[in-house]
Image (tube, rainbow, N blue to C red):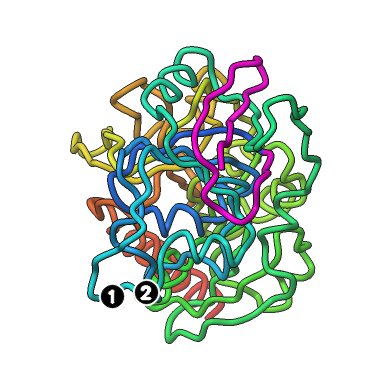
Amino acid sequence: MKGYLKLEDGSIFEGELISKNKKGYGEVVFTTGMTGYQEAITDPSYAGQIVVMTYPLIGNYGINKYDFQSEKPHIRGFVVREYCDKPSNFQSEESLLSYLDKHNIPVLSGIDTRALTKKLRENGTMRGIITCNPDDNIEFDQTNLLEEVSTKKPYRIAGIGPKLAFIDLGTKKSILKMLNSVGFDIYVFPYNASYDDVMQINPDAIFLSNGPGDPKDAVDAIELTKHFIGMKPVLGICLGHQIIALALGCNTVKMKFGHRGANQPVKDLLTNKDYITSQNHGYAVEEESIDKDKITVTHINLNDGTVEGIMHKFLPVFSVQYHPEACPGPRDSTDIFDKFMDIVMVYKRRFYFAEV
């Protein structure tokens, strides 16, 4: 069936609707990963978005049971240049289309994704609709994305090390796995957990996860972070990075088209090393708003110079914008989890001997 992607500026891209569901609304974004579509569609950070894959052939290795980042896809629609309906991979258990059909996600194939990506880069991210009727109007979704993607109740992932209060803003499973693998005893809390909720476990450290949407909408998480800064070691990734920045008095701004993909170059200003990183975000910390007397910019994006990491000069608080756990993408910077464990253990021993 003929289908269309209509953008809010009125432009229309024609293709073929190959899914059972024929309509979907969302913010239209592009990701530059050559592989990793399964991880992308199940990454909660993509909630509320129609995802455009810039790599021309998608679906060729199917869907497997190992690469899910959450229990279901969170995208509102999927756009590709060419869909492969005969996947070939020894781990493949079903086709990409059959998986998305199970979850009622519209899929549009045959789109000139190169022209679409150029338009989004030049004009910025726009809202859009996948539809079989180009005259349909674009609706504006008012869904609370954090409520949609966060855990509904606390749970634990047992470990042998320090207690970690993990604030789930829409986390990927791979982040939890990495933290657990370095030894953290993880207690996962919803996005709107209160200070009293978290203090019931008396955590040794706080972690703020990735997630979707405008960081300024995460009011509960910002206030919670303010309570713990200076009290416990705190680490944030992606949305968690932006929330830490806001809690420290910085500002965040919406980017023109964001960073999404597995090939974003980042410089570590502390070590002078360069990393290739996986990223997925549409907001950034405004460098001009950072109090350089208290906060150090630790990482920058080598493409556009945006802030990719910060660290408090006097307190055990730091964060990065990129995804060190990758999934998909390179794992150049996974040592950040070991670094966090080292910091937590130092502070844990310090307060233990202070009490003795």
Query: What amino acid is at disc 1?
Result: Gln
SS at mark 2 in the image: loop
- Is the residue 70 above or below the residue 202 in the image? above
Q: Which mark is residue 233?
A: none
Residue closer to the observer: 94 or 50: 94
Residue 56 coordinates in the image, percent (x, y): 31, 38
**Would you call the spot at circle 1 few (<14 residues within 10 Å), some (14-19), or many (20 or more)?**
few
SS at mark 1 in the image: loop
From the image, state whether disc 1 or disc 2 is nearer to you.
1
Question: Farthest residue in the left direction?
Answer: 273
Left or right of 12 in this view: 199: right
Q: Which mark is residue 91?
A: 1
First in residue order: circle 1 vs circle 2: 2
Task: Give the extent of the magenta segment.
Answer: 1-25
Residue 179 coordinates in the image, percent (x, y): 42, 69
* Residue for point 48% across, 50% down: 237
Left or right of 96 in this view: 222: right
Query: What amino acid is at disc 2?
Result: Tyr
Residue 304 coordinates in the image, percent (x, y): 36, 20
User: Considering the image in quadrants, where does the N terminus appear?
Assistant: top right
- Is the residue 7 above or below the residue 130 in the image? above
Task: Quote the CA–CA distance across marks 1 and 2.
Answer: 9 Å
Residue 277 coordinates in the image, percent (x, y): 30, 44
Contact, CB < 8 Å: mark 1 with mark 2? yes
Question: Farthest residue in the front direction?
Answer: 1
Q: Which residue is mark 2?
A: 66
Q: Is residue 263 visible?
A: yes
* Residue for point 45% across, 84% down: 159
* Residue for point 36% across, 35% down: 54
- Is the residue 229 above or below the residue 306 in the image? below
Any magenta on residue 110? Answer: no
Residue closer to the observer: 269 or 69: 69
